[in-house]
Amino acid sequence: MKIRVQSIHFDADSRLLQFIQEKVDKLLQFYDHIIGGEVFLKIDKSSDNKNKIVQIKIQLPGNDILAKEQCKTFEEATDLCMETLSRQIKRHKEKERGV
């Protein structure tokens, strides 16, 4: 699946980008008709140690789904976003089938 990753005010390393791509690709096992996605990585200026923000937007036929998490690491935030997105995709499929 084609995703676009934007790291805001910093440069993300290739390991992080590969990790995100692998995680987002796993969404295809829940739903085949995913059009694409966007990932925004941001570091919050707060003094809190949970200052890494990941926002993932997935484009589906008819609408988009969105997940946003703030954690200590980008990997942890990405994992939480994937859980949220997988639930949203399953719900979207159920609505599509009329269950």
Image (cartoon, rainbow, N blue to C red):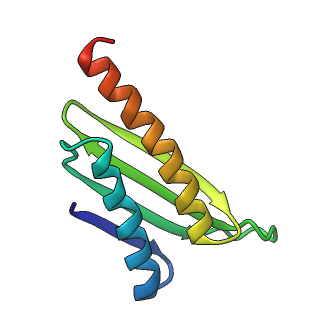
Q: Nearer the viewer, residue 62 or 32?
A: 32
Residue depicted at x 35% and y 69%:
21
Q: Nearer the viewer, residue 12 or 99?
A: 99
Residue depicted at x 81% and y 67%:
48
Q: Is residue 5 above or below residue 13?
A: above
Q: Nearer the viewer, residue 70 or 10?
A: 70
Q: Is residue 54 above or below residue 29?
A: below
Residue closest to the far front? 29
Residue depicted at x 21% and y 63%:
2
32 to the left or right of 90: left
Residue 93, visible in the rendered structure = yes
Q: Is residue 47 above or below residue 38?
A: below
Location of residue 33 in the rendering, given as x and y in whole percent from the top left corner: 18, 42
The quadrant of the image that shows the N terminus is bottom left
Residue 12, visible in the rendered structure = no
Residue closest to the far top? 98
Residue depicted at x 29% and y 55%:
37
The quadrant of the image that shows the C terminus is top left
43 to the left or right of 91: right
Residue 38 in which image quadrant: bottom left
Residue 23 in which image quadrant: bottom left
Location of residue 95 in the rendering, given as x and y in whole percent from the top left corner: 32, 18
Residue 59 in which image quadrant: top left
Q: Is residue 39 above or below residue 97?
A: below
Location of residue 30 in the rendering, given as x and y in whole percent from the top left corner: 32, 43
| Total numbered badges shown on the rendered structure | 0
